[in-house]
């Protein structure tokens, strides 16, 4: 594999990785992380100030002890000289000179530590001010970012260009398409069945002649049942359902009417 192909693959990989990182990065988390690091740095500076102040305090105690020792040696030398012991006085003054040298050295270190302490204290104060300012700016940026993100999401929801709304829109479109397809299919099948182009496999559908005959039969059954009920209410007998036997039904004969001018015949039997 040539170097050109390797370089190109490396560039593509870095570009995709950079895009993925940019997509995954949340500015609010980055700001919080930076603020945390600044707090850690401020804590280290404060700890350094405390360590320098502790060392300065120790030097102060040592200086106080050496100064007390120097004063004591000086007093001992005077007392020995007053007693005529010049040799003891010389020894006391010699020791006092050594103590004074230590005092001078410690005073130099003390001044250096005091200067370092002042510098660290000033740096700590400045860093504290920067951290406070960064915290204020951080919270402002986070609030602005959250507001912008919410506005963008609302705008995308209204416009329908967001990923979630796009998925919902596609689902609705698919449902509408399937519904329209099913409705069209059902309508087509109904038209084909009505025209007779398709046979009903269930055997429930009948042609027009069968349907008409069924309607006539149902009507005749109703008329026969109605006549039977009338005969029962009138005390007569129900007519013979001739239509069921395939014979025409005879019309009922009217009862003979009696002449009002004719004398009624005696229907009683003659006595023997």
Image (cartoon, grey):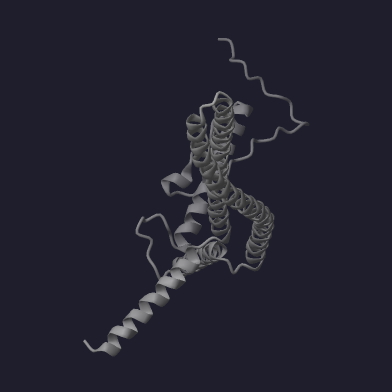
What is the tally of numbered marks visible in this picture? Answer: 0
Horizontal relation, residue 227 to residue 125: left or right: left
Residue 192 image position (x, y, % from top left) = 45, 69
For the residue pair 32 and 10, the one nearer the viewer reads as 32
Horizontal relation, residue 153 to residue 18: left or right: right
Position of 224 relative to 36 (above/below): above
For the residue pair 49 and 57, the one nearer the viewer reads as 57
Q: Residue at x 61, y 67 (%)?
A: 160
The quarter of the displayed image where residue 150 is located: bottom right
Residue 250 image position (x, y, % from top left) = 53, 45
Position of 271 relative to 4 (above/below): above
Horizontal relation, residue 33 to residue 197: left or right: right
State the quadrant of the N terminus. bottom left
- Residue 41 can be seen, yes or no: yes
For the residue pair 205 and 150, the one nearer the viewer reads as 150
Position of 97 relative to 32 (above/below): above
Horizontal relation, residue 99 to residue 200: left or right: right
For the residue pair 74 and 8, the one nearer the viewer reads as 74
């Amino acid at each position: 594999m040539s170097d050109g192909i390797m370089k190109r693959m490396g560039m593509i990989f870095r570009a995709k990785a950079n895009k993925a990182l940019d997509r995954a990065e949340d500015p609010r988390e980055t700001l919080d992380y930076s603020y945390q690091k600044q707090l850690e740095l401020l804590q280290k500076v404060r700890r350094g100030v405390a360590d320098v102040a502790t060392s300065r305090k120790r030097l102060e105690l040592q200086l106080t002890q050496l100064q007390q020792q120097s004063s004591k040696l000086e007093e001992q030398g005077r007392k020995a000289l007053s007693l005529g012991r010049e040799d003891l006085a010389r020894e006391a003054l010699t020791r006092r000179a050594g103590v004074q040298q230590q005092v001078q050295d410690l005073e130099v270190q003390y001044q250096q530590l005091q200067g370092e302490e002042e510098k660290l204290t000033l740096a700590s104060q400045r860093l504290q001010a920067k951290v406070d300012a960064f915290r204020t700016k951080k919270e402002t940026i986070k609030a602005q970012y959250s507001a912008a993100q919410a506005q963008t999401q609302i705008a995308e929801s209204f416009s329908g260009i967001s990923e979630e709304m796009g998925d919902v829109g596609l689902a609705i479109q698919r449902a509408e398409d399937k519904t329209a397809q099913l409705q069209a299919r059902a309508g087509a099948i109904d038209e084909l069945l009505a025209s007779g182009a398709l046979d009903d496999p269930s055997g429930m559908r009948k042609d027009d002649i069968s349907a008409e005959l069924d309607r006539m039969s149902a009507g005749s059954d109703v008329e026969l049942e109605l006549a039977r009920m009338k005969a029962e209410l009138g005390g007569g007998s129900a007519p013979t359902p001739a239509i069921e036997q395939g014979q025409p039904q005879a019309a009922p004969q009217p009862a003979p009417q009696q002449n009002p001018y004719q004398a009624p015949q005696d229907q009683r039997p003659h006595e023997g």
